[in-house]
């Protein structure tokens, strides 16, 4: 005779197995949820840690930039520059002779031009860190011929006489520690190449470029005025270093490539300067 308990036992077992499967599924879901929550928490914690480290590194770098930030300016005031007339000879102090000969026609060789006989000015590092490779780009903006004024526009600035290649002059010395000073070794080309000797005043801007120890290229801009006095054989030049226009911020500016890479990057026409720069002489 068949047992009456078999169907009941079978239904109970199926129900228990169903509940067991359900509970197991819920448990698996909860385990996955807990694991996911722990993983997300770990990711958030790691991200916050990385952000904190990045902020700390940036703060440290900012502090280093501030502690080693150079600022190079000319001492303000008027400076008398010793000058004389000399035969041009198509020669400029510190400029490759071939570049000068290419820039100026042959007939200018025998003309007389104004030139300085001694170093002049005082360019000083008033910042907290050393300034490297200090150069001064003399930019002429207005030329005065007695009562007439001529504006040096963008097209004129591209001429070699006014361009950066012939008017970006190195300071001597070109590396300045804090409170160190340097001088200029010659006057800008656009004044020397005044072959008719009619310029009486020049208004312009000095773009002083240098780099910090981290390789950032920095720039100061300062107004300048030059006055030429001619009375017979008497020749005088007065240079007034005036107001500051722009001062560099720490760490701002492009990174300067190594000298070898920078030299390769420049075309030959942009490299007229020789290594040593000195006032031109007869």
Image: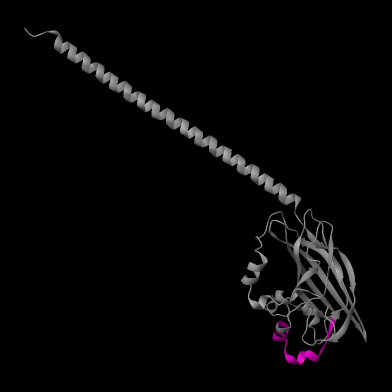
Q: Is residue 39 above or below residue 229?
A: above
Q: Residue at x 18, y 12 (%)?
A: 9
Q: Tell me the residue at 84%/62% (across/down).
A: 181
Q: Is residue 48 visible?
A: yes
- Magenta region includes residue 200: no
* Occupied quadrant, residue 213: bottom right
Residue placed most toward the observer, 264 or 59: 264
Left or right of 126? Residue 257 is left
> Which quadrant does the N terminus fall into?
top left
Q: Position of residue 130 (x, y in %)?
A: 77, 57
User: Would you say the magenta stretch is mainly helix, strand or loop?
Assistant: helix
Specify the segment rendered in magenta.
99-114
At 71% from the left and 84% from the top, the residue drawn is: 98
Q: 23 or 213, which is in the foreground?
A: 213
Q: Is residue 55 above or below residue 95?
A: above
Residue 110: x and y, percent? 81, 91
Quadrant that contains the C terminus? bottom right
- Residue at x-position 29% and y-position 19%: 20
Could you say which is closer to the camera, residue 73 or residue 269?
269
Give the quarter of the image for residue 80.
bottom right
Q: Position of residue 266 (x, y in %)?
A: 64, 72
């Amino acid at each position: 005779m068949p047992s009456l308990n078999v169907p009941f036992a079978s239904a109970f077992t199926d129900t228990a197995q169903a509940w067991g499967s359900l509970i197991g599924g819920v448990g698996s879901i909860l385990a996955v949820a807990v694991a996911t929550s722990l993983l997300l928490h770990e990711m958030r914690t790691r991200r916050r840690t990385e952000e904190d480290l990045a902020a700390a590194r940036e703060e440290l770098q900012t502090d280093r930039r501030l502690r080693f930030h150079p600022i190079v300016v000319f001492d303000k005031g008027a400076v008398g520059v010793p000058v004389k007339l000399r035969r041009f000879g198509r020669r400029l102090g510190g400029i490759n002779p071939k570049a000068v000969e290419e820039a100026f026609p042959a007939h200018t060789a025998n003309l007389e031009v104004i030139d300085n006989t001694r170093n002049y000015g005082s360019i000083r590092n008033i910042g907290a860190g050393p300034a490297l490779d200090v150069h001064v780009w003399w930019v002429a903006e207005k030329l005065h011929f007695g009562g007439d004024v001529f504006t040096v526009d963008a097209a004129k600035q591209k001429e070699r006489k006014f361009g950066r290649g012939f008017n970006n002059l190195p300071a001597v010395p070109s590396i300045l520690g804090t409170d160190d000073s340097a001088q200029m070794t010659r006057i800008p080309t656009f004044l020397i190449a005044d072959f008719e000797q009619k310029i009486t005043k020049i208004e312009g801007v000095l773009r002083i470029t240098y780099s910090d120890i981290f390789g950032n290229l920095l720039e100061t801009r300062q107004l300048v005025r030059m006055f030429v006095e001619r009375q017979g054989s008497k020749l005088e030049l007065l240079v007034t270093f005036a107001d500051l226009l722009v001062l560099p911020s720490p760490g701002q500016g492009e990174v300067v490539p190594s000298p070898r890479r920078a030299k390769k990057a420049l075309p030959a026409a942009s490299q007229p300067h020789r290594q040593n720069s000195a006032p031109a002489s007869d």
